[in-house]
Image: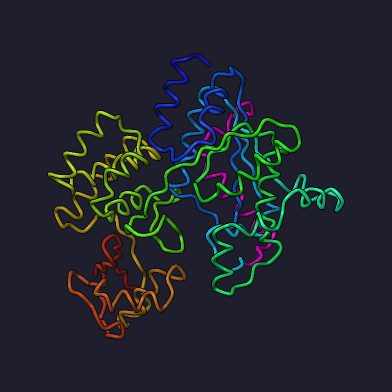
């Protein structure tokens, strides 16, 4: 690879890189001039990716655009075990049908960033290819190379021991399985969140032990979620998902605390370094405008310029000018007399639990025709065209039969 191309990659990666193991190996790899094999492994426990995951995907896309190959590894075998990383409890077993369904959802979302159209640039593999038919003797040989002391040293296992929580054997060996994947794929590079470092260092160990050049590991920056707290998580609902609509991406970004605007610009957009300096001033003088620009940039990255422009206009019309959107969905009611709870429940269906709907009322998050409803059991007389607003970003109208 030519020196100017190497500099472009290193400069682009610097914005989102946390650590490199090791920097010298990484420089040597880039300068080797050969096509790199980049491992990207996912356990399909839940069918979603968020923009935090996509940081790694965008870095891989940059390498794809320069002729390198991503090995998109579906951990269908290890999904049945469940990665214990960051978990205080054992994960439940996921049925095979759900694994297959989640796999397709993962791939569809990853296509928003990675190129799947060229087999020279991306190959999909599954680790059941080797683990599913591995003889017991070979498996025991792999296990025999790693000590219990080394495995139990992981921080989450130490926390479980402190809390007197159980650690099951299949969880304990998970890092061995993830590490062995790197050997089987002959990976040159893997780009991961820092919480996966222990597992991927195990990959370097096995590669060296079996005569391969160990993979370079790049860990990426992890930011707080849109609530300013823990990292993005579906469970906490503090994330911006690749599967979210462009409108949801824009609206969720607008929930971000002001002190994270510049960080999100740096990590989750491709704005230039010079623009980042100007944006730092804008965050100080007009954080609302800076946040709108951030939301538009995130939408632009996944949906294009035109959609980003439309979402910015919709947001300004709806929130800045306090107008009700013109394209809201409608709910057909069977009776013009109904409780407020039943109306809202009919709109959400099984997307929200009864408890979640009751909390919306308790928190003052439900209104009809701009009048708040705090009693979820209030009897309402409904009319065609009544407009309900739930939270800051959801509206629906009433249609009577």
Q: Quadrant of residue 79?
A: bottom right
In the image shown, does 68 or 337 lie closer to the viewer? 68
Question: What residue is shown at x 71% (from left), y 46% (from top)?
Answer: 127
Question: What residue is shown at x 62% (from left), y 54% (from top)?
Answer: 101
Q: Position of residue 386 (x, y in %)?
A: 24, 70
Q: Does the magenta segment cover residue 100?
A: yes
Residue furthest front as drawn: 149
Relative height, residue 280 to residue 92 (above, below): above
Q: How is the image coloured?
A: rainbow
Q: Quadrant of residue 359?
A: bottom left
Question: What residue is shown at x 38% (from left), y 77% (from top)?
Answer: 334
Q: Position of residue 184 (x, y in %)?
A: 73, 39
The quarter in which the C terminus is drawn is: bottom left
276 sits left or right of 100 in the view: left
Q: Quadrant of residue 217?
A: top right
In the image shown, does 387 or 251 lie closer to the viewer? 251
Q: Position of residue 38 (x, y in %)?
A: 59, 33
Q: Does the magenta segment cover residue 93?
A: yes
Question: What residue is shown at x 77% (from left), y 45% (from top)?
Answer: 130
368 sits left or right of 223 in the view: left
In the image shown, does 344 or 157 lie closer to the viewer? 157
Q: Position of residue 193 (x, y in %)?
A: 50, 46
* Residue extent of the magenta highlight: 92-121
Relative height, residue 393 to residue 4 (above, below): below
Relative height, residue 77 to residue 157 (above, below): above
């Amino acid at each position: 690879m030519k020196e100017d191309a190497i500099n472009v990659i290193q400069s682009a990666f610097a914005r989102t890189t946390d650590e490199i193991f090791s920097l010298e190996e990484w420089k040597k790899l880039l300068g080797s001039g050969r096509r790199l094999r980049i491992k990207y492994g996912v356990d399909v426990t839940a069918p979603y990716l968020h923009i935090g995951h996509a940081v790694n995907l965008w870095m891989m896309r940059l390498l794809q655009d320069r002729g390198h190959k991503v090995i998109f590894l579906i951990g269908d075998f290890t999904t049945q075990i469940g990665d214990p990383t960051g978990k205080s409890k054992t994960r439940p077993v996921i049925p095979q049908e759900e694994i297959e369904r989640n796999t397709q959802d993962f791939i569809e979302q990853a296509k928003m960033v990675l190129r799947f159209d060229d087999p020279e640039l991306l190959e999909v593999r599954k680790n059941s290819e080797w683990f599913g038919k591995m003889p017991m003797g070979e498996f025991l040989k792999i296990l025999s190379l790693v000590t219990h002391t080394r495995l139990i040293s992981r921080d989450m296992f130490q926390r479980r021991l402190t809390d007197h929580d159980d650690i099951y054997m299949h969880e304990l060996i998970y890092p061995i399985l993830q590490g062995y994947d790197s050997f089987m794929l002959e990976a040159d590079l893997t780009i991961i969140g820092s919480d996966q470092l222990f597992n991927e260092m195990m990959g370097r160990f096995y590669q060296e032990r079996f005569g391969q050049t160990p993979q370079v590991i790049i860990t990426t920056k992890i930011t707080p979620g849109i609530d300013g707290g823990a990292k993005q998580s579906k469970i906490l609902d503090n994330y911006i998902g690749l599967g979210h609509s462009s409108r949801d991406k824009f609206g969720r970004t607008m929930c971000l605390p002001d002190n994270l605007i510049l960080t999100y610009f740096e990590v989750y957009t491709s704005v230039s370094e010079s623009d980042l300096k100007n944006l730092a001033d804008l965050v100080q003088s007009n954080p609302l405008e800076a946040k709108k620009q951030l939301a538009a940039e995130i939408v632009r990255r996944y949906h294009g310029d035109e959609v980003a422009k439309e979402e910015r206009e919709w947001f300004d019309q709806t929130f800045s000018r306090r107008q009700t959107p013109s394209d809201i969905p409608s709910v057909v009611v069977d009776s013009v007399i109904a409780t407020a709870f039943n109306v809202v429940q009919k709109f959400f269906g099984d997307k929200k639990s009864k408890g979640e709907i009751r909390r919306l009322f308790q928190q003052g998050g439900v209104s009809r025709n701009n009048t708040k409803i705090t009693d979820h059991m209030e009897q309402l007389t409904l009319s065609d065209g009544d407009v309900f607003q739930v939270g800051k970003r959801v509206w629906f109208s009433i249609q009577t039969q």
